[in-house]
Image (tube, rainbow, N blue to C red):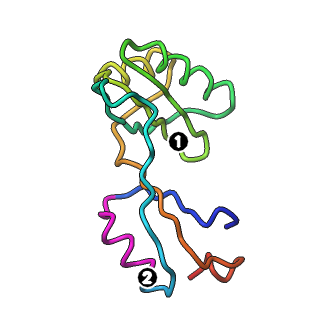
Amino acid sequence: LESESAEVVGTASAAEMLAAVESAGKEAEVVEDPGQVSPSVQSSETTLSIKGMTCGKCVARVEKALGAVPGVTSAVVSLEMELAEVVGSASAEALISAVEEVGKEATLAVPLRRLHIRGMDGQRGAAR
């Protein structure tokens, strides 16, 4: 709530998410990641759903495996969301294979979207 932001995973478009927030009486905007790679480098973001992680060591193993895939610029894994966000030119197949090699299950996930929501004040604002 303090950051006035939400991370949303799903099939809704950015416009549909904004409309839902605005119908609850709040203002919102989609926050685009500034990117961590030089524009001259061909890269993209791939989001994976990761199953089977139970602790921080699991997260570290998955991040290390993803980071070792040729073409990966960065890999961030969330235990709570069971997601990995990977930036770089590696194929989804190579990323999934790397995760499976450390004993976890991976599939392509719907991309993560970030919203900045103004006017969220405590539990009442979050529950709307």
| Image side of residue 95 versus residue 84, left or right | left
Q: Which picture quadrant has residue 89?
A: top left
Q: Residue at x 56, y 75 (%)?
A: 118
Q: Which residue is mark 1?
A: 82
Q: Position of residue 67 (x, y in %)?
A: 49, 18
CB within 8 Å, label 2 to label 1? no
Q: Residue at x 65, y 62 (%)?
A: 3
The tally of labels here is: 2
Sequence-wise, which precedes: disc 2 or disc 1?
2
- The residue tagged with tag 1: helix, strand or loop? loop
Q: Which picture quadrant has residue 122?
A: bottom right
Q: In this rendering, is residue 30 above or below 92?
A: below
Q: Residue at x 45, y 36 (%)?
A: 85
| Image side of residue 48 versus residue 127, left or right | left
The magenta stretch spans which residues?
11-22
Was residue 13 drawn as part of the magenta stretch in this picture? yes
Q: Which residue is mark 2?
A: 22
Q: In this rendering, is residue 47 above or below 87?
A: below
Instruction: Give the spatial CA distance, label 2 vs label 1.
Output: 28 Å
Q: Nearer the viewer, mark 2 or mark 1?
A: 2
